């Protein structure tokens, strides 16, 4: 879903637009009782999931490497530096990571029902 809404935007705008545009697609799809919220992910050196969180971030970069390089959003050298920075971060005693998930929950009505929301 995110790729549909970030296509054509600048990379710096992409994350902001994904969260801002969750409500409208749900309404258009005819969902009801829509609730938007955020889920913080806060990890710091010494907390139980810190190391796993940082390893996951590095893994995300590795798994996206081909697409990032092919689209010219990020070159090989920058990706290498980012992954090295994450490895360094995982060893720092003052390290922390803060991330915010955008969430949306809703209820789908009976099949064939259409929401009154105008498109």
Image: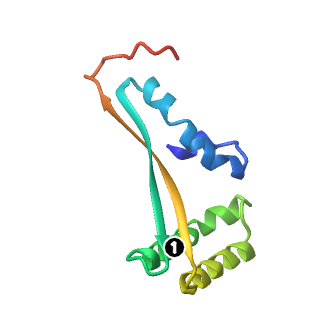
Residue 116 horizontal/vertical position (percent): 41, 12
Name of the residue lying farthest toward the left: 110
Q: Nearer the viewer, residue 38 or 112?
A: 38
Determine the image quadrant of residue 29.
top left
Q: Nearer the viewer, residue 32 or 45?
A: 45
Q: Residues within 10 Å of mark 1 (few under 14, many from 20)?
A: few
Q: Which residue is mark 1?
A: 59
Residue 105 horizontal/vertical position (percent): 36, 38
Image point (71%, 51%), residue name: 12
Image point (53%, 70%), residue name: 57
1 with respect to 9 (left or right)? left
Which colour style is shown?
rainbow
Q: Nearer the viewer, residue 83 or 1?
A: 83
Q: Nearer the viewer, residue 86 or 5?
A: 86
Give above or below for 18 relative to 51.
above
Image point (53%, 59%), residue name: 99
Image point (62%, 45%), residue name: 16
Q: Secondary structure at mark 1?
A: helix
Please count the marks in the image.
1
65 with respect to 47 (left or right)? right
Give above or below for 6 relative to 108.
below
Residue 71 horizontal/vertical position (percent): 70, 58
């Amino acid at each position: 879903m995110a790729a549909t809404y970030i296509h054509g935007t600048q990379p710096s705008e992409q994350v902001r637009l994904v969260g801002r545009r969750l409500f409208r697609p749900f309404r258009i799809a005819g969902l009801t009782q829509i609730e938007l919220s955020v889920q913080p992910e806060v990890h710091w050196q010494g907390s139980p999931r810190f190391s796993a969180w940082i390893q996951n971030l590095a893994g995300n970069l590795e798994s996206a490497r081909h697409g990032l390089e092919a689209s010219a959003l990020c070159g090989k050298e920058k990706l290498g530096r980012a992954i090295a920075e994450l490895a360094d971060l995982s060893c720092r005693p003052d390290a922390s990571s803060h991330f915010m998930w955008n969430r949306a929950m809703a209820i789908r009505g009976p099949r064939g029902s259409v929401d009154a929301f105008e498109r």
